[in-house]
Amino acid sequence: MTHFERALEFAERGRGKTGDHPLVGAVVVRNGEVVGEGWYEYEGVSHAEAIALEQAGDAARGATLYVTLEPCSHHGRTPPCADAVVDAGVARVVVGARDPNPVVDGRGLERLRGAGIEVELLDDLAARRQNEAWRVWKSLGRPFVTYKAAVTLDGRVTVPGRRWVSGEESRHRVHELRAVSDAVAVGMGTVRADAPRLDARDVEAGKQPRRLAFGRGPLPEGSELELRTGPLEEELRALAAEGVQSLLLEGGPTLATAFVAAGLVDKLLFFFAPVFSGQGPHVLGDLAAPLELLHLRTEPSGDDLSLEAYLREP
């Protein structure tokens, strides 16, 4: 494991605890030896860089700092991390990704370089992926949207005579996804047809996601979903203002196509089942132009095959 990979691993220790902050991990190395390490975990504590530098003490002078995200350069809840790096006498900083927060976005790197520190920006995909929801929330002012669907090999989302398209393991993974999403959404067509609960079941969940229905109401009597009736982009901005960073879109093709056509889907997650349906709606409706997919990843999911792909750089 490289020192930077170690920093990424440390950053993950804050998963689910950082609130409106990103995941950040830091490792200080001098003469090939790790002398300090840290990660950001929750509001009210020092940032990852400050923790690692404090642990390193005098050994930080002339050392290399590996950090997964650009050090902040402004006074917020804590002093600027870039200043702490300069004051510690670090000679070189390896940064995983720029911070898209408008109050940072390159200023931390400038502060370090202005102090004579050698800076290497990796623009690492793993580092960007690690904070993919937070990055969109900060830079675009809306939640990061993942469209999840179970799909047959002929691209359809129903199989005649079957309740489920995908297998048990894939459905379990969906509940895991719900457990780590801030909100889950469907369209009113799905609400009327399936009366979905959209909660995370039979998995460890620190909290349940907000459960939304987009479209014209009314909701059926007894439904526990929130109805969102406004234009999609306006609704997403309102959700972002309420702290929703990630949205798992589980609606049918009509809602998904509307999201995609509006440029509001960031990632696709399809579970391909080993079956040809032969009839029924396709996973997406007609689009004005082809979709180019980025950073495809596939892996088995029980008898299914999961495919993850981005519609824009994370």
Image (cartoon, grey):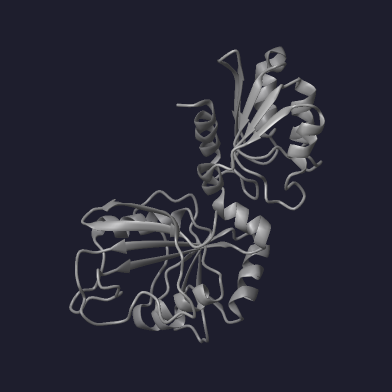
Residue 254 visible in the displayed image: yes
Work out whether 17 lies above or below 226: above
Nearest the viewer among 106 and 158 is 106
Q: Position of residue 134 (x, y in %)?
A: 60, 52
* Quarter of the figure with the N terminus: top left
Residue occupying image coordinates x 65% and y 50%: 20
* Quarter of the figure with the C terminus: bottom right
Residue 201 visible in the displayed image: no
Task: Name the image quarter holding residue 90.
Answer: top right
In this picture, residue 112 sits left or right of residue 95: right
Residue occupying image coordinates x 42% and y 69%: 250
Nearest the viewer among 33 and 123 is 123
Residue occupying image coordinates x 19% and y 68%: 275
Residue occupying image coordinates x 53% and y 60%: 312
Q: Position of residue 212 (x, y in %)?
A: 51, 72
Nearest the viewer among 219 and 36 is 36
